[in-house]
Image: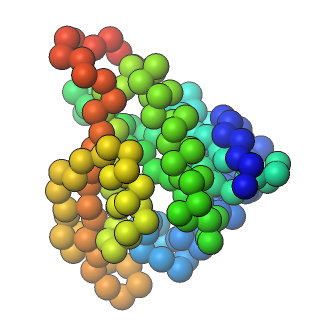
Amino acid sequence: MSLTIRDATAADADACAAIYRPYVLDTAITFETDPPSAAEMAARITETAETHAWLVAEDAGRVIGYAYARPFAARPAYRWSCEVSVYLEMGRRRTGAGRALYGVLLPRLVTRGYHVAVAKMTLPNEASLGLHAALGFQPVGTHPRIGWKHRAWHDVAIAQLSLTGASTPPADPG
């Protein structure tokens, strides 16, 4: 596999929506229940890229995965923290593509002034837990039975990564 990691654009919305669709319909990995349209995905890409980052992974010129960061929470004190996610085509997990995407995403967040990255993972999800642990994310808790999907309650594990060791007052990210 020869991967290229690049910034996503609205033109990648169809591919990203297609990658995400089976996660929405067939798994509890995401708690969305209706797959977003390409137009909705394009809006998400555009909005997220302005303040954080949205990247795609291409294999032989075809988008096979994406990763992004978005605000962690709405309150102003959280503005230096972000939530990160990665999605790959079904069958592409544990191929190195997720690590490659995060290998570009996480340094980008540092340059944009973010201090902490948070990952939330619906359990069970050994591949995602393993990826985040390998990248240095530390488990900080679990929300037990917090989401209802596919006729069952699901736990969500939370892990975070310090992007900087700064203890001085930060500049506004962005």
**The quadrant where residue 10 appears:** top right
Q: Which residue occupies 19% across, 11% down?
A: 168
Q: On screen, 29 above or below 164?
A: below
Q: How many marks?
A: 0
Q: Which residue occupies 28% across, 33% down?
A: 162
Q: Which residue occupies 45% across, 21% down?
A: 112
**The quadrant where residue 34 appears:** bottom right
Q: On screen, 128 above or below 125?
A: above
Horizontal relation, residue 55 to residue 102: left or right: right
**Coordinates of residue 82 in the picture (x, y in percent):** 36, 37
Horizontal relation, residue 70 to residue 42: left or right: left
**Coordinates of residue 45 in the picture (x, y in percent):** 61, 42
Q: Considering the image in quadrants, where does the C terminus appear?
A: top left
Q: In this view of the protein, can residue 68 be seen by the observer?
A: no
**The quadrant where residue 1 appears:** bottom right
In this figure, which colouring scheme has been used for the structure?
A: rainbow
Q: On screen, 111 above or below 14?
A: above
Q: Which residue occupies 50% across, 42% down?
A: 102
**Coordinates of residue 115 in the picture (x, y in percent):** 31, 27
Residue farthest to the right, as pictured: 61
Q: In this view of the protein, can residue 126 be seen by the observer?
A: yes
**Coordinates of residue 56 in the picture (x, y in percent):** 65, 45
Residue farthest to the bottom, as pictured: 151
